[in-house]
Image: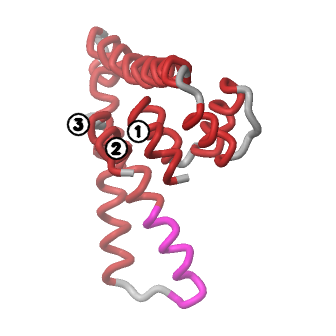
Amino acid sequence: MNELLRLLGNIAPALAGVVAGPAGSAAVSVIARHLGVADTVEAVTQAVAADPDVALKLAQIDLETIRVQHANTENARAMQVAALAQSDVFSKRFTMYLTGFWSVCAAVYIGFITFSIIPEPNVRFADTILGFILGTVIATMLNFWFGSSIGSKEKDARKL
């Protein structure tokens, strides 16, 4: 897998980031289908290393990946612009209210599990909920308000 990521990092950095991420096996399947090889990391790595025209094929997939990422971001921005254009104060401030609500919930929960005694059978549940709050809720709010750096993802993909 590291060899494939290194090859993709030179040809299609955004695609390398997708392959390195949680949807990596699905991305390898898409690449394999585009290259006409078996659906394995080894077959895709050999095809990428052997085919001089693979850069063009992967660049097309890379461009489509960037388009999908951009469309997702553009939809979120359009939603926010439409909400701000309304005269309804609640609609204008809904994302702020939602962010505030989840921030308070997260702070209360973190304080609760930090300073109270959790029964031994419930520790795993508390840890799972904490992981969800930190990894999903807080991360999503931060990405919404402050953005997510595609450049950072590309940098990480180039390291591999």
Magenta segment main secondary structure: helix
Whole-percent x, y for residue 60 in the image? 51, 17
The one of 96 and 61 positioned closer to us in this rendering: 61
Provide the residue designation for mark 1.
9
Is 100 drawn above or below residue 29 in the view shown? below
Counting other residues with Cα less than 10 Å from the Cα at mark 1, is it few (<14), some (14-19), or many (20 or more)? many
Q: Which mark is residue 146?
A: 3
Sequence order check, earlier mark of 3 and 1:
1
Q: CA distance from mark 3 to mark 1?
A: 26 Å
- Nearer mark to the viewer, of 3 and 1: 1
- Residue 41, disc: none
Q: Look at the image and give the residue range highlighted in magenta.
A: 119-131
Mark 1 element type: helix
| Outermost residue to the left | 146
Task: In the rendered view, tell whether residue 81 sits above or below residue 49.
Answer: above
Image depth: mark 2 or mark 3 in front: 2
